[in-house]
RNA sequence: GUGGGUGUGGCGAAGCGGUUAACGCACCGGAUUGUGGCUCCGGCACUCGUGGGUUCAAAUCCCAUCACUCACC
């Protein structure tokens, strides 16, 4: 069902392609987040035009509202939201564990952020939901331990994740949906290695790297990625969950990661910040009040082709929805171009130079 | 003309005798990484219409004055 081809490698960076029932996805790939079956403020057509061919949506949110049964009745998530590309659904593990749930071996009980009502997620329940949604890639229900989790806690979360992954695999049956396992293990190299072993033994068509970018220092994440790069199977896609700042994407690719997702580009867009080759620009700032140039003169996105920083700043300050639509489109476009440039560099065998040039320009 | 009300930072608005004058908006910064557009965190007042007075102490009480406002004539 899921086809993954690797065309070439440049160092540890991999150039490949994932083929799902709905689209072909060139990797390394960045997946925009459409939590509630929509990439906030943008139409599917606009998201598609940025070059996105797969996006992430959320089990937790869609289960609560409008309900996975309703989405199934609508003909599945793709049809419901009119998205022609592929969809990956997160399992809700990350959300549920942020809600201080009551966790047992069986599952996790949590309160809805919408109305406080109680719900119980088990691996079986989550599979039922993800299968009903009909995403191309489903994630197993995992326990995401926080960045400050000690060894014992990370250890326990790792084993829980393994047990739940087994149960997910046991009940997962779908005509085209692919189930990815998730590696946990906190910030501990020994646990990461062990988790990678446990999960990859189950032979999933792809693997998520979870529990990173949750507050730990970046260099800690990079070191763990270096380790996982050795321990994860070379012929399966590796998905670093929740990562999306330009520098992290470049660093991730350098360490063998194929897939990323993150709310960052769209979230900061909604708060008035945009990506630029030299770093982030807080467009709300007064210095842009009379800046009549586009966000980036070399950017081909709709916002940069048609509007000035001053105008977009005005829209943002005035609370006009067009402002956050334009910054959202720009940020998505920026990251998709970045991934495109990365792929081109790997293809040409010039990734090392690309890496150097990128960080010479981009200020953190 | 008579009677009443109000005058506090760019705007709205607490405080009505006693620490460095709430708060909201706006403004100026910052944050944001598998949940957050309407989010979060900071910053921004030699000063309470003006002039006198009472008091150890006044934005808070008294007098005068100016402005705005309501009612009546």
Image (tube, helix red, strand yellow):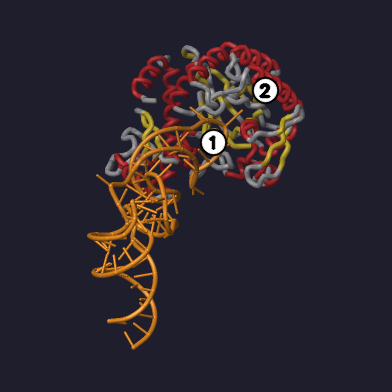
Q: Is residue A243 left or right of residue B59?
A: right
Which corner quadrant of the image does residue A348 belong to? top left
Which corner quadrant of the image does residue A197 belong to? top right
Contact, mark 1 vs mark 2 (Cβ under 8 Å): no
Residue hosting label 2: A157
Name which residue lies at 62% across and 25% down.
A145
Q: Is residue A233 visible?
A: no
Name which residue lies at 61% across and 15% down.
A192
Q: Chain of mark 1?
A: A
Q: CA distance from mark 1 to mark 2?
A: 25 Å
Residue hosting label 1: A33
Q: Name which of mark 1 and mark 2 comes first in the sequence.
A: 1
Label 1: how many Cα within 10 Å (few below 14, some 14–19, many 20+)? many
Q: Secondary structure at mark 2?
A: helix
User: Picture coordinates of residue A315 (x, y %)?
Assistant: 38, 48
Q: Judge if badges 1 and 2 mark residues of a common chain.
A: yes
């Amino acid at each position: 069902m899921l086809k993954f081809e690797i065309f070439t490698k440049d160092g540890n960076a991999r150039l490949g392609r994932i083929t799902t029932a709905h689209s072909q996805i060139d990797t390394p790939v960045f997946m925009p987040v459409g939590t509630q079956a929509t990439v906030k403020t943008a139409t599917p057509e606009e998201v598609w035009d940025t070059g996105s061919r797969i996006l992430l949506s959320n089990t937790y949110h869609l289960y609560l509202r409008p309900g996975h049964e309703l989405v199934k009745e609508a003909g599945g998530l793709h049809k419901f939201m009119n998205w022609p590309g592929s969809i990956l659904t997160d399992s809700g593990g990350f959300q549920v564990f942020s809600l201080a749930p009551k966790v047992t071996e069986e599952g996790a009980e949590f309160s809805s952020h919408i109305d406080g009502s109680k719900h119980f997620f088990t691996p079986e329940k989550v599979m039922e939901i993800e299968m009903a949604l009909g995403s191309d890639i489903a994630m197993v229900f995992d326990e995401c331990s926080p960045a400050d989790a000690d060894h014992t806690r990370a250890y326990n979360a790792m084993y829980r994740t393994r047990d739940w992954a087994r149960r997910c695999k046991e009940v997962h049956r779908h005509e085209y949906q692919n189930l990815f396992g998730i590696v946990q293990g906190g910030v501990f190299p020994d646990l990461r290695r062990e988790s990678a072993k446990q999960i990859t033994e189950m032979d999933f068509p792809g693997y998520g790297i979870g529990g990173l970018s949750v507050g730990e220092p970046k260099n800690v994440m990079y070191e763990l990625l270096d380790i996982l790069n050795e321990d994860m199977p070379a012929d399966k896609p590796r998905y670093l969950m929740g990562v999306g700042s330009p520098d992290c994407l470049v660093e991730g690719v350098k360490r063998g990661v194929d897939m990323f997702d993150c709310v960052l580009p769209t979230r900061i867009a909604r708060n008035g910040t945009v990506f630029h080759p030299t770093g982030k620009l807080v467009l709300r700032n007064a210095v842009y009040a009379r800046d009549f140039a586009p966000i980036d003169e070399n950017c081909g996105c709709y916002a940069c082709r048609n509007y000035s920083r001053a105008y977009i700043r005005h829209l943002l300050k005035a609370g006009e929805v067009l402002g956050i639509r334009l910054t959202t489109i720009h940020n998505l476009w920026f990251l998709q171009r970045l991934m495109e440039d990365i792929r081109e560099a790997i293809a040409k065998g010039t990734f090392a130079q690309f890496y150097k040039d990128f960080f010479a320009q981009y200020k953190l």
